[in-house]
Image (spheres, helix red, strand yellow):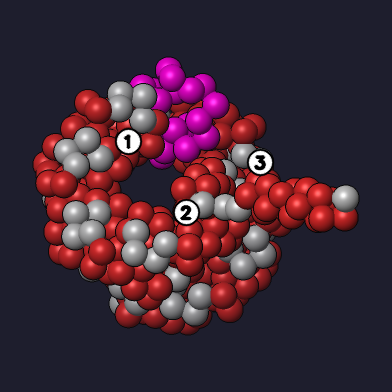
Amino acid sequence: MLRFFSVILFIIFIFHNLLLAQTYQDYLIRGKELYEADSLKKSYEFFSKAIQSEPNRSEAWALRSSVNFLLKDYKNALLDADKALKIDPLSSIAYFSKGNVFLATKSFSKALDHYATVIDLDSTFVDAYFNLAWTYQLLEMYDSALHFIDICLKFEPKYEEAWILKGTIYHDMEEYEKAVQQYDEVLSMNPLNVEAYYEKAISLTHLQKFIDALENYNKTIALKPDNPEIYDQRGTVHTQLQNWQAAYEDFSKAIQLNSNYYLAYTNRAYVLLKMNRLQEGIKDCQKALILNPNDGMTFNTRGVIYYEMGKMKEACNDWKKAISLKENIYAPKNYQNYCK
């Protein structure tokens, strides 16, 4: 009888351990699930367990490389990718991860080579086309950028980020109407896409369609109320419309959200100048220059305020400093007109 129970307990023990046992594939699947859920550190753990269970299979190495890249551990991202490629020289995921590291570190030529290799290995790898377009956009090679983003969208017509990138490419080409069309394409698919409203507002501002730009900034802020840059940009539009109080409130909100946002101080100083609050404008310029001592626009703005205060020596010194800092839009004219 005792022997019988011992056998039963042994069978239960073995069965229990079999239930708990995790295979390479189990770890891999769980790692992918966590990766898709943006739980990067947890996904790293499971890909590491997959590697420990079967170190001579490439996929876990390649996927862990991708996680390392997103965690900005570029050194280990490259090491893991190279390990994957040593096991499987045809690993498109490993080449893609290396390309991402090279893009992030501005090694654009290497990035292009690696993304091209990905496409040679897998002509349906949509994100490789996207990243090729992105790299060419950063290189200001806009025809190539448009070529690859169109291929990306042919494979995946509802890829919102790809439409936005296409809009950015047209914006950089100063084809602002076409840029707006791309952002509208995104918003027709997803009326809650914050980035599309924001980028559309910027292009509309360049078109000097300030009321339309303002409407899109309002929608952006309704969806994302805690981004100081958006308030600063909307304040700039209010400035163009000479809505001084509204501009002042937006720049103040940007500063409230980020007290180190030097550009918002400079922009608010200009508004304070227009509101004839000159001493406050000087204080804002001084705050901006503490945060960024080499901003030519701030020196120019402070020079204008000094000029309005009748302090010609201080005004000319500031405009001269602005010129030395390559502020070549306003300061040279101010200096030429009032200081010589």
Q: Judge whether 86 appears above or below 1 on screen.
A: below
Residue shown at 43%/17% (left/top)? 188
Residue carrying label 3 = 225
Q: Amino acid at mark 2?
A: Tyr
In the rendered image, residue 82, in percent from the top left (x then y), is placed at: 28, 69
Q: Secondary structure at mark 3?
A: loop
Amino acid type at image mark 3? Pro
Three-letter amino acid code at the position of disc 1: Ala
What SS does tag 1 mark? helix
> Is residue 278 one of those drawn in magenta?
no
Boundaries of the magenta span: 184-202
Residue shown at the point (47%, 53%) measured from the top left: 24
Considering only vertical position in the picture, is 266 above or below 249?
below
Tags 1 and 3 touching, CB below 8 Å: no
Q: Left of 99 or right of it: where is 214? A: right
Q: Which residue is mark 2?
A: 24
Q: Which image quadrant for residue 259?
A: bottom right
Please tell me whether mark 2 sits on a helix, a strand or a loop.
helix
Q: Would residue 292 be found to the left or right of residue 161 on screen?
A: right
Residue 73 location, quadrant: bottom left
What is the distance, in whole Å, between disc 1 and disc 2 at their CAs? 34 Å
Instruction: Residue 185: give x, y in percent of width and height.
Output: 36, 22
Q: Which residue is mark 1?
A: 162
Q: Earlier in the sequence, mark 1 or mark 3?
A: 1
Q: Residue furthest top?
A: 188
Q: Pointer 2: residues within 10 angstroms few (<14), some, or many (20+)? A: some
The spot of residue 100 in percent (x, y) is: 31, 59
